[in-house]
Amino acid sequence: MTRSFPLLRLAVLGLALSVTVQLACSEGGGTGPNPVPTTLTLNKTSVALDALGATDALSATVRDQNGNIMSGASVSWTSSSAAVASVSASGVVTAVANGSATVTASSGAANGQASVTVAQRAAQLQKLSGDVQTAPVATVLTDSLVLIVNDSRGNAIAGVNVVFAASASGGSVSPGSAATDAAGRVAAQWSFGTAAGAHAVTA
């Protein structure tokens, strides 16, 4: 009987040691801190749109504190001037008016920016009135020549300079050049020369 007690104590100590080791392994075997959005980069840092309603798509890449891409990270989009350029929830930028704006993408504390410039470019010159008139030589045509300047999506452009030139012996046009008004229109008066026949004015 006296020899069984030390053996029993040794067995109990061994069990206690085993439990302690298992608990220590369990506490130290975690997967580390959760991923946190740390950096955000955009596929482009500048966008240029030359027509109202024109669009361009931005995309964001979010990385965590370890530099790993976070494919499921939520990204929000904002524009510093929605009256110039709006941006959708998916990062599509749309031109609204001539000017500049900054689009910002954010995910947590990480963010990235792209500058946006909207500058309409003349793509269409449309005749509104004054075409196919007939008049005696050396007279001023009754109807003015009226044109409208549009961008590639059919939106009128203000402030575009239009130059008029009559064909040889076709007389003169006044003014020889003029800027389009707020509605994108410009007008000129055609005075026939002294040569009879068909003539033309180029704008």
Image: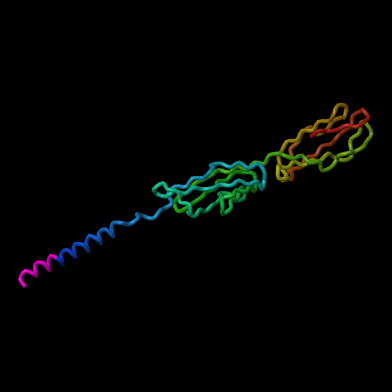
Question: Is 203 displayed left or right of 3 in the figure?
Answer: right
Q: Is residue 7 above or below residue 54?
A: below
Identified at 12% across, 65% down, the residue is 10
Quarter placement of the C terminus: top right
- Residue 55 part of the magenta segment: no
Determine the residue located farthest toward the left in the rendered image: 2
Q: In the rendered view, how is the structure colored?
A: rainbow
- In-front residue for pair 82/106: 106
Question: Is 169 displayed left or right of 83 in the figure?
Answer: right
- Per the picture, the main secondary structure of the magenta-coloured stretch is helix
Q: Position of residue 101 (x, y in %)?
A: 57, 45
- In-front residue for pair 3/14: 3
- Residue 4 part of the magenta segment: yes
The residue segment tinted magenta is 1-10
The quarter of the picture where residue 1 lies is bottom left
Q: Position of residue 20 (x, y in %)?
A: 21, 62
